[in-house]
Image (cartoon, grey):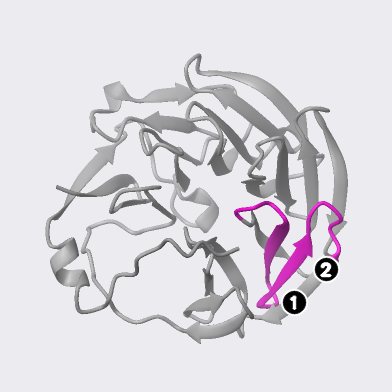
Amino acid sequence: MSNQNTRYLSRSAAPKYFSDIQIRAFHDPNARHHPGSHSGTILRTVAWNNLGSRIATGGAGGNVKIWNPEKADVRSSTDLKGTGLQTTEKVQWDPTHAERLASCGVGDSGVVKFWDYRTAKATQDIKTGGDNYSLSYHPDAYVVAVGRKDNKIKILDLRQNAVVNTIDEGNDTTFQTTFSHNGTILLQTHASGKIVLRSYPSLEIIYTFNAHTAGCYCLDISPSGKYIATGGNDALISLWDTTDWMHVESGEYVHEIKANYPAHAVAWHPSKVGSSFLGIVIPIYRSV
């Protein structure tokens, strides 16, 4: 999974490197916060496309909105309407195409919609038969893994427009699924705190390890493929070496960016020093 052509930023160098970062806030005046529960959070997911030229967000009401990172005015954004969802839990861009993306969530028999941003219309939809909470593209963009609320993972094939395989995780809730950069491994995070690695396309379990003492909510693979970062309910963010899956470290303070809004999701720009996170307002961090 590793790409050796990567430079790493030391802790001592980070403050100088990030000193020019500025905040650009993207505000949707039509969005309303629904207090009282996590499910009422207006924004639930954020994703950059593969060129870093568009940002997709989704949340309560089933809304999916596409933002231009160079223009903070909501009038420069595009709404993708007709998701058929009560809440959009996940948006993900096609890794091979900067204008295509997928969305899934709660409602309408668990429909997964595939969109072309240029027309603002859905090009395809596949129903999984239940509420969906996670979505990840295979690198070839023909296959998508979707995690359902009932702990089943559905493998969708866009060429067949159908569910082609199902993984049943029993009583251990799956919070996230992610394909490795080369597409040969499907990684899953679980409520038990473990991470499961499955060979793809066989879906056979090849490795399991306990990443957290409580639920493991999220996972991201470094651009180099050498490390994965995991976050859990035990308030730890841990780094793991994919060479032997040994724990590297639980993180070290590098730099802090202060904002006035809570963060519900985070996404790194694919090539620049910049990130976005979700609250009622979407601050976009950029280096100038």
Q: Amino acid at mark 2?
A: Ile
What residue is pinned by disc 1?
A: 208
Q: Amino acid at mark 1?
A: Thr
Disc 1 residue crowd, few under 14, some 14–19, many 20+, Cα 10 Å: some
What residue is pinned by disc 2?
A: 205
Q: Residue at x 87, y 55 (%)?
A: 202
Quick check: marks 1 and 2 in contact, CB under 8 Å? yes
Disc 2 residue crowd, few under 14, some 14–19, many 20+, Cα 10 Å: some
Rendered image quadrant of residue 68: top left
Rendered image quadrant of residue 5: bottom left
Residue 37 coordinates in the image, percent (x, y): 51, 57
Q: Residue at x 73, y 67 (%)?
A: 197
Foreground of the two, 141 or 56: 141
Is residue 185 highlighted in magenta? yes
Foreground of the two, 136 or 179: 179
| Residue segment shown in magenta | 181-205
In the picture as drawn, the residue positioned furthest to the front comes out as 5
- Position of residue 210 relative to residue 216, above or below, is below
Residue 271 coordinates in the image, percent (x, y): 36, 48
Is residue 228 highlighted in magenta? no
Q: Residue at x 21, y 70 (%)?
A: 14
Residue 84 seen in the current view: no
Left or right? Give the position of 72 relative to 199: left
Residue 65 coordinates in the image, percent (x, y): 43, 31
Foreground of the two, 268 or 90: 268
Q: Secondary structure at mark 1?
A: strand
Residue 272 seen in the current view: yes
Foreground of the two, 198 or 177: 198
